[in-house]
Amino acid sequence: MKLKYMTIALLIATLSGCATQKVLTEQEMFESNPALAQAKKSIELAAQGNLALYAPVQLKSAENSYKEALRQAQNNDPKADNSAHQVIANVEAAEKQAVKAKYIFEEVFNAREQ
């Protein structure tokens, strides 16, 4: 009977030890993944540059990639760095699309101002 209780106690201790996983804070994530900090900054700059107006699809893709990178970084997943670089690439694509869109819509915006 004692052996049964000892086994159950050992099993519970083992499972509870494996079940707890440390979740990183935002500061720890940025320190361990510098690309993630750069990705956050590029998302913020994209919002300031009205890229949502000129390149909504690319910006939404970047935001989704950033959410995934954050989730991976919180769990200390090594894929977080690749996801952060994907965010940066998506924002760069959005910036290129925005340049084209601004050129195309320039006449419309000028007509609205008059």
Image (cartoon, helix red, strand yellow):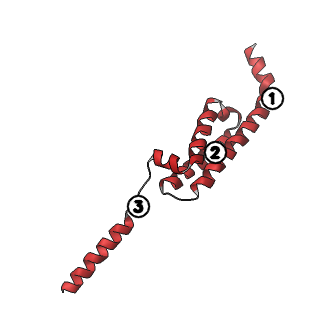
Tell me where residue 98 sits by quadrant.
top right
The dot on residue 62 is: 2
Between marks 3 and 2, how big is the CA–CA gap? Answer: 28 Å
Q: Label 3: how many residues lie within 10 Å, few (<14), some (14-19) or many (20+)?
A: few
- Residue 103, disc: 1
Residue with the most extreme top position: 114
Name the quadrant of the N terminus: bottom left
For the C terminus, the quadrant is: top right
- Image quadrant assignment for residue 57: top right
Secondary structure category for the residue under label 3: loop
Q: Using the image as rendered, state which of residue 55 and residue 49 is in the foreground.
A: 49
Q: Is residue 63 left or right of residue 105?
A: left
* Amino acid on which the number 2 mark rests in the picture: Ala
Q: Which corner quadrant of the image does residue 112 belong to?
A: top right
**Residue corresponding to mark 3:** 21
Amino acid type at mark 1 = Tyr
Say if mark 1 contacts mark 3, CB within 8 Å.
Answer: no
Q: Are marks 3 and 2 in contact (CB under 8 Å)?
A: no
Residue 82, given in percent of the width and then of the height, sits at: 63, 54
Dot 1 or dot 2: first in sequence order is 2
The answer to whether residue 48 is left or right of residue 75 is right
Crowd rating for badge 1 (residues with CA inside 10 Å; few <14, some 14–19, many 20+): few
Earlier-in-chain disc, 3 versus 2: 3
| Structural distance between the alpha carbons of marks 1 and 2 | 22 Å
Where in the figure is residue 68, as x and y percent of width and height? 56, 52
Residue at 66% x, 44% y is 88
Q: Marks 1 and 3, Cα distance to the nearest angstrom?
A: 50 Å
Q: Amino acid at mark 3?
A: Gln
User: Measuring 51% from the left and 47% from the top, which residue is drawn there?
Assistant: 31
Mark 2 is surrounded, within 10 Å at the Cα level, by few (under 14), some (14 to 19) or many (20 or more) other residues, namely many
Residue 109 in percent (x, y) is at 75, 22
